[in-house]
């Protein structure tokens, strides 16, 4: 187990852009957050908000033509943006692992599942092959899979099984940080519930590992995470502890998200959708990126990008309304 400092991950003013023939897409533009030892951070937002780009930036695997153009990403005390290709490969899987949206695409279709997990262990740990195979069997049992399935190829497993196998691979080298990017995508609701229960069990047992959970489902984030980062159009809207975001949401976008999903303790509740659509990231509006959909928007919102302010006790918000620059 690696020794962790106070912050497993410390991201400062991250900027990750995609350079397309039609223009520059600022997928992540000036985002900062920290994940402490053993903490789970939930990153949430609509499609195109930049949440997955954050995860791929951390592991230095942004797809072409994406590029991290600014900021710092400290894993423990090391800025991973300064590492060369060989150095970053030594960190992936051993210290930072990732559970991707599509487990089928993450596995080699020609190799047996068990061999792929065993190879990941052998690459990063100096252990005999039989020890690595035994560890792979233990991991399969931990995620609720029969060890006989280790001999199967990816296409022989169901979607839920492949996702569990992906989680087993992510745990193989006892990483300090696990990034789970929409791990229940494309699964039916029953299998989704099983995967989420597994993640919750792992969440409570992995006291020395931190988790970044990326999702568009706020109810899942609330259940699993200690802190929440709200993303919209590549920008950070709000960032605070989960109880603070739920009980004292300050950004209009956060309030809109909270009002759009059901709460079983309230028998009578009106659901309010957020009007409009997410922004065209190749043609973002001037000023606050959320102002075309915000009922509080005034001229200052249309002209100036709001600063991120610490309202109180590490509750960060980017909104002119919160700063008192417009009337409620």
Image (spheres, rainbow, N blue to C red):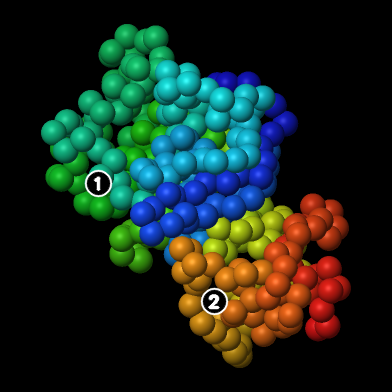
Number of numbered discs visible in the structure rendering: 2
Residue 65 position by quadrant: top left
**Residue 283 position in % (x across, y down):** 49, 67
Q: Nearer the viewer, residue 269 or 309?
A: 309
**Which label is found at residue 261?**
2
**Which label is found at residue 275?**
none
Q: Residues within 10 Å of mark 1 (few under 14, many from 20)?
A: some
* Identity of the residue drawn at 62% across and 83% down: 266
Q: Secondary structure at mark 1?
A: helix
**Residue 44 position in % (x across, y down):** 55, 60
**Residue 134 position in % (x across, y down):** 32, 21
Question: Which quadrant: the N terminus?
Answer: top right
Marks 2 and 1, Cα distance to the nearest angstrom? 30 Å
Q: Residues within 10 Å of mark 2 (few under 14, many from 20)?
A: some
Q: Which residue is mark 1?
A: 104
* Identity of the residue drawn at 58% across and 46% down: 15
Kindly indicate whether the residue at mark 1 contacts the one at mark 2 (C-beta within 8 angstroms).
Answer: no
**Residue 269 position in % (x across, y down):** 61, 88
* Identity of the residue drawn at 47% across and 24% down: 88
Q: Is residue 225 above or below residue 256?
A: above
Q: Is residue 152 above or below residue 265?
A: above
Residue 147 position by quadrant: top left
Compare marks 2 and 1 and give the one earlier in the sequence.
1
Q: Decide if residue 184 is in sight here.
A: no
Question: Which quadrant: the C terminus?
Answer: bottom right
Q: Is residue 234 above or below residue 278?
A: above
Residue 257 position by quadrant: bottom right
Q: Nearer the viewer, residue 278 or 18?
A: 18
Q: Decide if residue 48 is in sight here.
A: yes
């Amino acid at each position: 187990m690696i020794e962790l400092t106070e912050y497993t991950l410390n991201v400062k003013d991250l900027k990750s852009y995609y350079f397309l023939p039609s223009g520059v897409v600022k997928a992540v533009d000036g985002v900062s957050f920290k994940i402490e030892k053993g903490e789970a951070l939930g990153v949430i937002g609509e499609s195109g908000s930049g949440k997955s780009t954050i995860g791929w930036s951390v592991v230095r695997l942004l797809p072409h033509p994406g590029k991290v153009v600014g900021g710092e990403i400290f894993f423990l005390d090391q800025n991973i943006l300064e590492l060369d290709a060989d150095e970053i490969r030594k960190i992936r899987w051993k210290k930072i692992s990732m559970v991707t949206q599509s487990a089928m695409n993450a596995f080699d279709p020609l190799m047996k599942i068990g061999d792929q997990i065993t190879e990941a262990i052998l690459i990063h740990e100096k252990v005999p092959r039989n020890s690595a195979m035994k560890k792979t069997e233990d991991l399969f049992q931990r995620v609720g899979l029969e060890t006989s399935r280790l001999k199967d190829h990816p296409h022989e497993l169901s979607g839920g099984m492949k996702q569990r196998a992906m989680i087993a691979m992510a745990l193989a080298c006892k990483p300090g940080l696990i990034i789970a990017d929409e791990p229940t995508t494309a699964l039916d609701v029953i299998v989704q519930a099983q995967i989420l229960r597994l993640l919750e069990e792992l969440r409570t047992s992995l006291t020395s590992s931190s988790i970044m959970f990326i999702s568009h489902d706020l109810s899942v984030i609330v259940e699993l995470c200690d802190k929440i980062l709200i993303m919209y159009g590549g920008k950070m809207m709000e960032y605070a502890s989960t109880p603070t975001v739920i009980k004292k949401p300050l950004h209009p976008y956060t309030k809109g998200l909270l009002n759009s999903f059901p709460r079983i303790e309230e028998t009578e509740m009106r659901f309010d959708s957020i009007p409009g659509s997410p922004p065209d990231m190749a043609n973002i509006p001037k000023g606050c990126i959320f102002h075309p959909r915000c009922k509080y928007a005034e001229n200052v919102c249309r002209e100036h990008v709001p600063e991120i302010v610490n309202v109180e006790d590490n509750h960060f918000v980017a909104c002119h309304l919160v700063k008192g620059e417009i009337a409620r």
